[in-house]
Amino acid sequence: MKPDFTKKLLAWNSNQNQRSMPWKGEKDPYRIWLSEIILQQTRVEQGWDYYLSFINAFPAVKDLATAPEAKVFKLWEGLGYYSRCRNLIATAKLINEKYNGIFPSSYEAIINLKGIGPYTAAAIASFAFNLPYAVVDGNVLRVIARIYGIDKPVDSPQGRKLLNEIAGTLLDKRSPGIYNQAIMDFGAVICKPKAPLCQNCFMKNCCVAFNQGLVDRLPVKEKKINKKTRWFYYYVVRYNTSVYIKERQDRDIWRHLNEFFLLERTERMKESEIIMNETIKPFFEKYGARVMAVSKLYSQQLTHQTIRGQFIEISCQKPAAMDEPFRKVAARDLARHAFPKFITTYLQEKNVNLSQL
């Protein structure tokens, strides 16, 4: 099936593939790397504007490596999965120092860069340097599992190993970049997760899933993610025209992003507890604080957890003596600082400058 599939896929790509992607045909490894990192867990429509912002702000690896980290995080704000941004910064610095700002050209060197796994390494190697490495993303896994009728879970070691081996045999080693883009496009527009266009598929006559009625059952996944819920209660403490914020430093979500005074709970708090509890009691006793407003309930779904919570706006009559790393910033300047999406959503609804407080 290998020569037949590969030949037909490349023919489909040349004659019928109309999927438009902003990065198609890009040969610059730096730009390919940026696009791939930005697109992880992100829709193309959303990622495009971020990609352009990064390219305009940091045209080369050296520019990204030497930029203030706060500026990089601010540009990343809203994309989520901030470990990607941390890895982006670390890798840019390493390339700048170890490779004199020139992106490495071997697969072995690329895959050893922080934040780059087999898929991203194969994408950079094949698109930028025409090296024969097969990309294996969700689209590719789905295509191969259906065509070959593979019922081994794609997220199991055995299943992944088998699918990777097949992907390698299908790869057109003369034009690996073109082939890799073609099979991903095919999975995105024809062999889709839901409502695939089987009647338009050039492989329908020899596709095991189609001929055995298994399209909706393949690929198989065995792991179920147990998602926990965390309750974040943010106290937006204000004195005159300033607000207190700090940078998250714990090895947890949103590291290096800013936040307000946080009270975390495993369960939802009652409103009476939200506006008066032992943690925030000192604000009322020492600084003459008043609760100005309690926000609606906000929620953000992450991969392994759900963040839910509210924002409690507090106005103090005296400056609050909050320990480091808290710092006082002008409310009108909050938009200059990087916050996680959970907080930026609230700020945007409050018109950013908190003029309503």
Image (tube, helix red, strand yellow):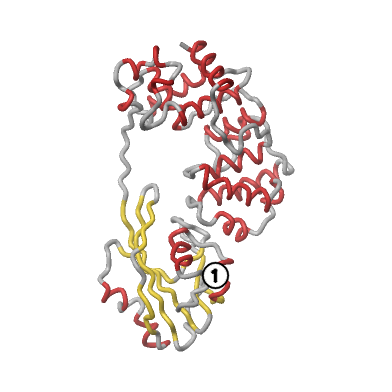
Going by the image, does 100 lie left or right of 200? right
Viewport quadrant of the C terminus: bottom left
Find residue 204 and report its horizontal and vertical position in percent: 40, 16
Q: Pointer 1: what residue?
A: 334
Find residue 168 and report its horizontal and vertical position in percent: 51, 20
Circle count: 1
Secondary structure of the residue carrying tag 1 is helix
- 196 is higher (above) or lower (below) than 10: below
Pick the residue in front: 297 or 329: 297
Question: Which residue appears at 56% of the width and 48% of the height?
Answer: 87
Q: Is disc 1 surrounded by few (<14), some (14 to 19) or many (20+) residues within 10 Å?
A: some
Pick the residue in front: 270 or 295: 295
Residue at the extreme right of the image, as rendered: 100
- 74 is higher (above) or lower (below) than 166: below
Residue 15: quarter of image = top right
Question: Which residue appears at 46% of the width and 77% of the height?
Answer: 356
Find residue 323 and report its horizontal and vertical position in percent: 48, 76
Going by the image, does 214 lie left or right of 28? left
Pick the residue in front: 252 or 178: 178
Q: Amino acid at mark 1?
A: Leu
Residue 311: quarter of image = bottom left
Pick the residue in front: 349 or 172: 349
Residue 121: quarter of image = top right
- 40 is higher (above) or lower (below) than 56: above
Find residue 79 and report its horizontal and vertical position in percent: 51, 52
